[in-house]
Amino acid sequence: MTLLFLIRHGENEYSQKGRLPGQLPGIHLNEHGREQAAQLAESLGKAPIKAVYASPLERAVETAEPLAKALKLDLELRPGLMDGNIGKWSGKEIKKLGKDPMWKIVQAAPSRARFPGGESMQETQTRIVNELESICALHPKDLVVVVFHADPILLAVAYFLGLPLDQFHRLSMDTGAVTLMAIGESGARLLALNLKPPFKFDLPKRKK
């Protein structure tokens, strides 16, 4: 099985102030986010990780770079790992979007939601799952890091666990946090969810 470290990028101005970035470029880590990236590199820099992938959005790249450097690995960017395309909602404050009728659908029945001018939640989930399955195919027995975004991570976890899309909001993912999943032809297992360094778990031993 492939062991995936699914890592949400570090804190930035948008996550700190409750704004939705979507696929907007130019959003960088703030000071705390850079500290989170450094902590991830310190905690995972000696793990037997074989590859580091990331969304090409700056906040993900800046989170992944210190870890890739510590591991002496090239950072590989995959556009398919980008955050959800939320169209006209990009950059808007959550407290203001709460008055939009679509917000209730996004929260209560995300399987029916399509962001104005953007993707549906189902399309985002399909895109992310396809990317992760492609990565797993490249690394069938490896430990791999994938740095991207909150909702895409949770949508992927829900899919691999067999949870209905409408229940993915029951899962949680903080900035700079790690979720560990084992994925193979026989299915998937959730080994850890929303953990922050320093980590207190042992990597599962692989069968020879």
Image (tube, helix red, strand yellow):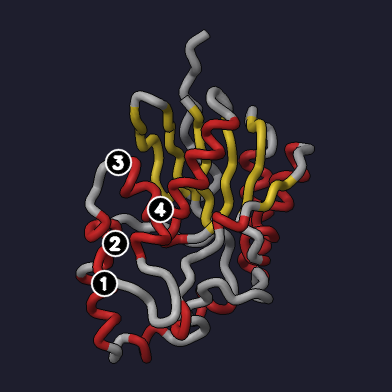
User: In this picture, is 138 found above or below 117?
Assistant: above
How far apart are labels 2 and 3 at the CA level? 14 Å
Q: Give the CA separation, mark 1 to mark 4.
A: 19 Å
Residue 27 on image: x %, y %: 64, 75
First along the sequence among labels 1 and 2:
1
Q: Which residue is mark 1?
A: 107
> According to the image, label 4 marks what residue?
126
Quarter of the image where one finds residue 105: bottom left
Give left or right: position of 109 versus 52.
left
Residue 118, position as x, y percentages in the image: 44, 75
Q: Is residue 97 above or below residue 21?
A: below
Local SS, label 3 = helix
The residue labelled by disc 2 is 169
Image check: 136 left or right of 154?
right
Label 1 sits on a secondary structure element that is helix
Which residue corresponds to the image point at 61% horizontal and 57% vertical from the top-left?
A: 79
Kindly identify the residue that appears in the image at 36 percent across and 33 percent down.
188
- Mark 1 or mark 4, which has the lower sequence index? 1
The numbered disc on residue 122 is none
Circle 3 crowding by C-alpha within 10 Å: few under 14, some 14–19, many from 20: few
Estimate how packed mark 2 is, as few (under 14), some (14 to 19) or many (20 or more) residues with alpha carbons within 10 Å: some
Amino acid type at mark 1:
Gln
The residue carrying mark 3 is 161
Among the two numbered marks 3 and 4 on one chain, the one whose residue lies closer to the N terminus: 4
Q: Which numbered disc flags the more N-terminal residue, 2 or 4?
A: 4
Q: Nearer the viewer, mark 2 or mark 4?
A: 4
Q: Amino acid at mark 2?
A: His
Residue 47: image quadrant is: top right
How far separated are the C-alphas under marks 3 and 4? 14 Å
Tags 1 and 2 touching, CB below 8 Å: yes
Distance from label 2 to label 4 (Cα)? 17 Å
